[in-house]
């Protein structure tokens, strides 16, 4: 009987812990509404942008360094402002990667993005100087693609510099983080 009570107590404790973790409030993009300069995605990502970044694992150790050359254009397609961000990555180990985003402004400060290695659509919301993207990315690991969830935050510092912090999770477990600094000419 004591063993059953212990198991029941332990199970309740785990459920309560999960509830507390999932019910904690997270930052909302609207909290940045009064921050300036205002981030207008189609203005910042228009033309050439460079990015410098690192990937850190869950312990905070830098696992990879990289640079990204981004060429961006915007046009109105079927009445929707649509951008193409052509990203060329070069990693510290000499490997390269290409990602081409198609981003649509679905309504004021609301975005959808697609790329070949994004599962479904990325969704983004901008407010003030911030933009929050959420999406699932196919991450190549040991010859296989693993679906990893990204909670991606961009903060415009000034007209030339934007900082980016993206947390990666799998099944709700924190895997690591990508940190980038974008610069415009």
Image: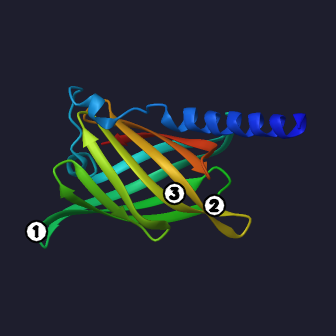
Instruction: Pick whichever, 177 or 147, lies toward us.
Output: 147
Q: Which of the two marks, 1 or 2, is nearer to us in this view?
A: 1
* Relative to 102, 26 lies left or right: right
Q: From the top left corner, tell me how far across and down residue 165 is, in percent.
A: 47, 38
Residue that badge 2 annotates: 95
For the point 15% across and 65% down, the residue is 80
Residue 125 visible: yes
Let me know if residue 61 appears in the view: no
At a point 25% along the width and 48% down the height, the residue shown is 41
Badge 1 is on which residue?
Answer: 79
Q: Residue furthest front?
A: 1
Mark 2: which secondary structure? loop
Image spot of residue 70 (x, y percent)? 38, 55
Relative vertical location of residue 38 with respect to residue 169 in this rendering, above or below: above
Horizontal side of residue 160 vs 20, given as left or right:
left
Towards the viewer: 170 or 114? 170
Label 1: which secondary element = loop
- Please give the label number shown on residue 151: none
Across and down, in percent, residue 34 comes to 20, 26
Quadrant of the drawing holding the N terminus: top right
Of residues 138 and 183, which is closer to you in this image?
A: 138
The local crowd at label 2, few if under 14, some if 14 to 19, many if 20 or more residues have their Cα within 10 Å, is few
Q: Earlier in the sequence, mark 1 or mark 3?
A: 1
- What's the distance in space between the residues labelled 3 and 2, CA to CA? 8 Å
Is 4 on the left or on the right of 170, as rendered?
Answer: right
Question: What residue is drawn where x is 25% and y is 35%?
Answer: 159
Name the residue that disc number 3 marks.
89
Are dots 1 and 2 in contact, CB under 8 Å? no
């Amino acid at each position: 009987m004591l063993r059953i009570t212990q198991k029941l107590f332990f199970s309740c404790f785990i459920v309560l812990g999960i509830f507390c973790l999932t019910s904690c409030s997270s930052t909302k993009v609207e909290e940045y509404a009064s921050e300036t300069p205002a981030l207008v995605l189609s203005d910042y990502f228009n033309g050439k942008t460079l990015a410098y970044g690192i990937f850190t694992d869950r312990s905070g150790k830098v696992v990879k360094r990289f640079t990204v050359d981004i060429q961006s254009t915007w046009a109105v397609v079927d009445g929707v402002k649509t951008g193409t961000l052509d990203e060329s990555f070069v990693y510290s180990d000499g490997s390269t990667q290409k990602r081409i985003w198609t981003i649509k402004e679905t309504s004021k400060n609301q975005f959808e993005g697609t790329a070949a290695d994004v599962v479904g659509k990325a969704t983004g919301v901008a407010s003030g100087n911030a933009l929050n993207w959420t999406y699932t990315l196919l991450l190549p690991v040991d010859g296989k693609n693993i679906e990893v969830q990204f909670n991606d935050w961009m903060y415009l510092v000034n007209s030339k510099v934007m900082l980016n912090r993206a947390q990666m999770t799998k099944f709700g477990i924190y895997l690591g983080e990508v940190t980038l600094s974008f610069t415009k000419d």
